[in-house]
Amino acid sequence: MNIGMKRFLMLLISFVFVISLFGCAFDATRFSESSFWGSQDDKPAKTDEQTENTPVPSPTGEPGSENWTIMIYMNGSDLESEGGEATANLQSLLNVALPESINVIIYTGGTAVWQNDLISPYYNQIWRVVDQELVLLESIDAKNMGDSGTLAEFLSYAQSNYTADKKALFFWDHGGGSIMGFGADELFNYDGLWLSEMAAAFRDSYDGQPYDLIGFDACLMASVETASILVPYAEYMVASEEIEPGGGWNYEYLFGQLAQNPDMAGEELGIAVTDGYYDKYLGTEMESIITCSVIDLSKIPALEESLAAFAGGLSGSVTAPETMSTLAVARQTAESYGDAPGQVSFDMIDLYDFVDLQEDADQTLSSDLLAAIEDAVVYEVSGFQRMYSYGLSIYFPF
């Protein structure tokens, strides 16, 4: 993070006295007992097969012969134990007949109960999708999925064993915005990954081949801060500014699109994620607050420079009462995310909307920053109750 960005964040933080943050809340309904794996209302006893910490062989292609390797870091948490949402998304994925040139490698853990009869809550497990089934590759004694080392080990394993022309990484679980980060491991005191821990995992596992796409099937992760940590390692990011419904993305749609066009680029895959996600909730009560955006990470350094210049322009005048007042009104009015009656805000707002609303900064600096945001956000969708969402949020305590 450059000095200008730090200066801007310190300026914003000075506006608040006390802040506390909370996890995403969802109206989760227990997954149907008629699922393809059956149901599992109680934590199962270990079987002889599950006590053997032995990998199960899986077919592999020739190194480099595949179009894509898609890695999914699936921290089940209470979304799975209480609602079976991870199981539902896996079922959706397995409905798609994938070509052999697409590897899908899934890391599971982080929940006390899996609502299916295949995945064990006693181990972190690595799976490969083969012929619309999950094939077990590794079973590992349960590790904290909120630890950067756990993520790094999975990324290293998948990249080493399943090389491909393109690669993507999807995070699945709760999201807590720029301050709380991603994930809540139910077995380890609901620990999650701070952005700094994610950055450390990428640094420790990076093989020199950029991710074509990194996505967050999680709340509140489409922020400038999240994008900033991904810049050295990926080309595009896809995420939501707002909270997500517990059901998350439309895996059948996005993998169906990839199966039809295995040569698609990372930007195209991000658009497929976005379109499928919005379409999943079309006509439901959640449609109005859905947000999702595809970010060109190569544009983030220029955006950070514009943000630093904008902050520098504010720093000389922010102590004037009239300036503070107009900035406070802009902050209060800007599109915000994760808010709920009677609860403390996550303090995430749309950056474009805030800059567009405020009136006291240098207008040239404001225009430059708005243009930089427009340049970085290559695609976005938002429901009618989030019509002032432009694709990138920022942490701004009020």
Image (cartoon, helix red, strand yellow):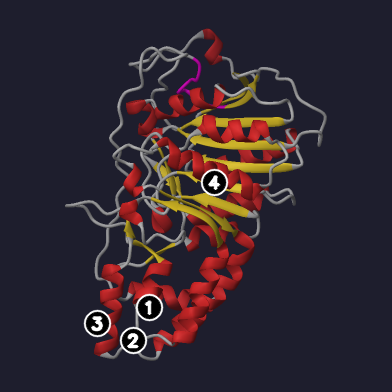
Q: Which residues are magenta?
A: 118-125
For the residues labelled 1 and 4, say whether their Cβ atoms are less than 8 Å apart: no
**Prevalent SS, magenta region:** loop
Q: CA distance from mark 3 to mark 4?
A: 37 Å
Other residues around mark 1 within 10 Å, as few (<14) / some (14–19) / many (≥20): some
N-terminal of the two: label 1 or label 3? Answer: 1
Instruction: Residue under label 3, please give it.
Output: 325
- Viewer-nearest of discs 1 and 2: 2
Other residues around mark 4 within 10 Å, as few (<14) / some (14–19) / many (≥20): many
Task: Give residue 326's quadrant in the image.
Answer: bottom left
Instruction: Residue under label 1, please give it.
Output: 11
| Residue 65 circle label | none
Does 103 sit left or right of 367 as displayed? right
Residue type pointed to by label 3? Ser
Residue type pointed to by label 2? Val
N-terminal of the two: label 3 or label 4? Answer: 4
Residue type pointed to by label 4? Gly
Instruction: Residue under label 4, please give it.
Output: 215
Residue type pointed to by label 1? Leu
Q: CA distance from mark 3 to mark 2?
A: 9 Å
Residue at image location 46% in from the left, 37% down from the top: 249
Instruction: Residue under label 2, please give it.
Output: 318
**From what the image shows, is residue 388 above or below residue 316?**
above
SS state under label 4: strand
Other residues around mark 3 within 10 Å, as few (<14) / some (14–19) / many (≥20): few
**Residue 29 in the image: x percent, y percent?**
30, 27
- Viewer-nearest of discs 3 and 2: 3
SS state under label 2: loop
